[in-house]
Image (cartoon, rainbow, N blue to C red):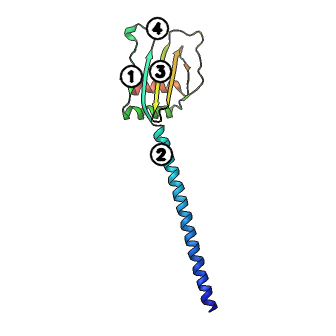
Amino acid sequence: LMNRQKGYLAIAIIIVLAITASAAIFAIYTANKSKQEAESKKQLENKLIKVIYSTKNPSLGPQYNQDAPITYEDTDSLNTISDLLKKYDISQIEEIKAAGCVGGTNYQYDLTYANSKAVNYAEYKCGGNFYGNMGGDVAGFVKDFSDKLQR
């Protein structure tokens, strides 16, 4: 009778451990799934949906200035722009003003994200230097943007 009770106790312990392990595995799965869903939502909200680009060079005559902005809303262009922003570590910084520099080129990038966030970058290239509110490798970004996206 004593051995039978020990056997039942062992079976009960095994059942409790199996239930506890199943609950732990389910909790981990649920937490991981929630984390993945939150990350997916964040990526979707941070998805670039529109970019308006314009440039002007006041030192050139009007016939050589690109006055009309270019709007990018197609997937290929937006993916390229997103990749360039990451590649050149572009971020918004406090504006750096150009003191005493005239005749350069103005670059304007207006970005709109799926979460309705808007980021406006304004850069001025004068004397080989960039001034404005873009941080990162601005020269590399401007060159690659021009090479890959201007029509």
Which of disc 3 and disc 1 is earlier in sequence? Answer: 1
Q: Which residue is mark 3?
A: 108
Q: Which residue is mark 1?
A: 70
| Three-letter residue code for mark 2 | Ser
Q: Quadrant of the N terminus?
A: bottom right
| Three-letter residue code for mark 4 | Ser
Q: Which residue is mark 4?
A: 59
Establish if 37 lies above or below 8.
above
| Three-letter residue code for mark 3 | Gln
* Label 2 CA crowd tier, 10 Å (few <14, some 14–19, many 20+): few
Which of disc 4 and disc 1 is earlier in sequence? Answer: 4
What distance separates the C-alpha of mark 1 from that of mark 2?
Answer: 30 Å
Decide if residue 1 is on the left or right side of residue 145. right
What distance separates the C-alpha of mark 1 from that of mark 4?
Answer: 21 Å
Decide if residue 3 is on the left or right side of residue 49. right
What distance separates the C-alpha of mark 1 from that of mark 3?
Answer: 10 Å
The residue sitting at the right extreme is: 2
Which of disc 2 and disc 4 is earlier in sequence? Answer: 2
At horizontal 53% and vertical 50% (from top left) the residue drawn is: 35
What distance separates the C-alpha of mark 3 from that of mark 2?
Answer: 30 Å
Which of pointers 4 and 2 indicates the residue nearer the eye? 2
| Three-letter residue code for mark 1 | Ile
Q: Which residue is mark 2?
A: 40
